[in-house]
Amino acid sequence: MDKNKRKELQDEFKQIKVYMGVVLVKNNLNGKLFVSAYPNLKNKWMTMKAQLDLGMFGNLQLQKDWKELGEDAFSFEVLEQFDTEKISDVRWEVKKLEKQWREKLQSYDDKGYHKRPANR
């Protein structure tokens, strides 16, 4: 690939908007919720499904249920998304959003795949 074409493709890539946000994975059989926030939502469900299919997902309880019940037992939803262009500290905002949504949905213990925060 010549240098001009490469630069053109790089410039196009830089113009793609990036959205941060919160996703929900719901076990439709038992109602358990997995809530997580990410600095880039692009293709997030595809990435999560690939990790779950390969047995490499970070949440062991969700991974276990996925293996036992299969993909059809789960649904995926973007709960909230924001353009990152005007946000100065994306990582801080992602952590804050995740905490807010986990609290709102109470995705702990029997209702979810998360451990209740220790500072309660």
Image: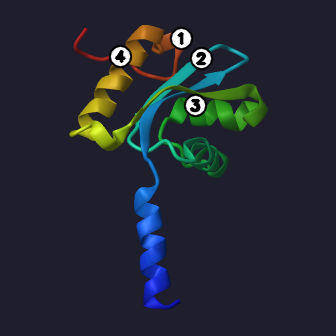
**What is the secondary structure assignment of the residue under circle 1?**
helix
Give the residue number, with chain letter if any, for mark 2: 32
The amino acid at mark 3 is Leu
Are circles 2 and 3 on residues that touch, CB within 8 Å? no
Q: Neighbour class for label 2 at 10 Å: few (<14), some, many (≥20)?
A: some
Q: Neighbour class for label 3 at 10 Å: few (<14), some, many (≥20)?
A: many
Are circles 4 and 3 on residues that touch, CB within 8 Å? no
**What is the secondary structure assignment of the residue under circle 3?**
helix
Residue at 46% of width from left, 63% of height from top? 13
- Earlier sequence position, callout 1 versus callout 3: 3
Q: CA distance from mark 4 to mark 2?
A: 17 Å
Give the residue number, with chain letter if any, for mark 4: 100
Q: CA distance from mark 2 to mark 3?
A: 9 Å
Please name which of the two marks, 4 or 3, marks the residue nearer to the observer: 4
Q: Which is more toward the observer, 96 or 116?
A: 96
Quarter of the rendering containing residue 92:
top left
Give the residue number, with chain letter if any, for mark 3: 62
Quarter of the image for the C terminus: give it.
Answer: top left
Q: CA distance from mark 4 to mark 3?
A: 20 Å
Please name which of the two marks, 4 or 2, marks the residue nearer to the observer: 4
Residue 84 locus on image (x, y percent): 35, 40
Give the residue number, with chain letter if any, for mark 1: 110
- Earlier sequence position, callout 4 versus callout 2: 2
Q: Which is more toward the observer, 104 or 117?
A: 104
Residue 10 locus on image (x, y percent): 43, 71
Q: Is residue 58 above or below residue 109?
A: below
The amino acid at mark 2 is Lys
**What is the secondary structure assignment of the residue under circle 4?**
helix
Q: CA distance from mark 1 to mark 2?
A: 7 Å
Q: Is residue 74 above or below residue 43?
A: above
Left or right: 70 with respect to 59? right
